[in-house]
Image (cartoon, rainbow, N blue to C red):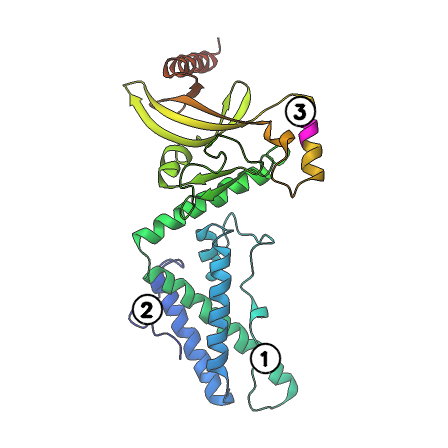
Amino acid sequence: MFKDYTHLENQIGSKESIERQAYLHGKLTNYLNNINKLLGITDLKEEYDRLTSKLMSVFENNKDHSPLEDEMAKLINVKTQYYNYSYKINRYDTSHTFCMQYNHGIEELDRYNLSLINNTLLEIVKKELYIEYHLNDTEDQRKKARLQNTIIKCNSYLNHNLANAELYNLSYHNSEGSPAGFLHEVINMSREINTKPKIYVDEKWCTNVYDKNLQILEFEGARAFTLKCEWLDEDDEKCIYDTQVLQITGTRDEKLLANRAQYYYSSRDNSEAIRALFKVKDLALSVSKDGRHWALGTTPAKAASTMRRRQKLSMLRTLNL
């Protein structure tokens, strides 16, 4: 009934290794099989299949809302820095199990045995999900997981760190499967901007933008959200990128009007007051070779000049001049 991982078992090793989890899985399955011999549980196989299906559904759902490493940690009961549950995330707990029937004994013992069986079965299924995911791991799967993790962390940053900014439902999404591809849904072919802009993320975006911490920049005193960032030129001092950014700017009165429209017409996608604040700009981005300084400009020369000025200011601060 249960999966057999005896060929993987190894008691020595980190808790995250599949060999150690296979060893613990073997201990749990032997324990539950011995209990079953005594109690004669008639529907154990049915409950095992049902719980496996249920937890697989929980795992697939949570991967869209929680970093993969956190979900894997939950399966083996290891807490991480981001170990939490949002309203979009389901729990791996005994509420997903069902009451199993077996030969009744003393009522108190029945309840104790049932709790013991449910908890043991739950841990067995969680370990099987963990081990099977790693056994079937592929390079393509790792790329997709990295992309999804980037999206989750970017959206989390928007929701928490910039909660008081006027973002008007700005969000990051996977470009795979999008009818627009990497031509972002922020603007259509006529460059008209939607009121609920989406920044589509692909592997190139992850490498050129997220890995270099360039997803949220600054241009002319306002935040600039990087839509695309493609290599243009480089020398010994800097690298120049052809960059497209989204800015949400406007006067105080324009923002008040947009906030009012957002509050009263949040379900509508065509608010002119909100759309008027969105600006999509094609710019040049200059990044120093050490990655510590960067600047946006309307031309590569202006971007490089601003970047050098920031480097000098940083050096002067270091020298305390």
Q: Nearer the viewer, mark 1 or mark 2?
A: 1
Q: Nearer the viewer, mark 3 or mark 2?
A: 3
Q: For the residue marked with disc 1, what is the amino acid?
A: Cys
CA separation, marks 3 and 2? Answer: 64 Å
Residue on which the image places disc 2 = 9
Helix, strand, or loop for circle 2?
loop
- Left or right: residue 260 compared with residue 233: right
Q: Quadrant of residue 271?
A: top right
Of the image marks 1 and 3, the number of the one nearer the N terminus: 1
Residue 239 lies in magenta, yes or no?
Answer: no
Residue on which the image places disc 3 = 254
**Within 10 angstroms of label 3, few (less than 14), some, or many (20 or more) residues?**
some
Front residue of this view, candidates 5 and 53: 53
Tally of marks = 3
Q: Quadrant of residue 309?
A: top left
CA separation, marks 1 and 2? Answer: 31 Å
Stretch in magenta: 254-258
Q: Nearer the viewer, mark 1 or mark 3?
A: 3
- Left or right: residue 17 compared with residue 106: left
- Left or right: residue 90 compared with residue 259: left
Q: For the residue marked with disc 2, what is the amino acid?
A: Glu
Contact? badges 1 and 2 (CB < 8 Å) = no
Q: For the residue marked with disc 3, what is the amino acid?
A: Glu
Of the image marks 3 and 2, the number of the one nearer the N terminus: 2
- The spot of residue 183 in percent (x, y) is 42, 36
CA separation, marks 1 and 3? Answer: 59 Å
Residue on which the image places disc 1 = 99
Helix, strand, or loop for circle 3?
helix
**Within 10 angstroms of label 2, few (less than 14), some, or many (20 or more) residues?**
some
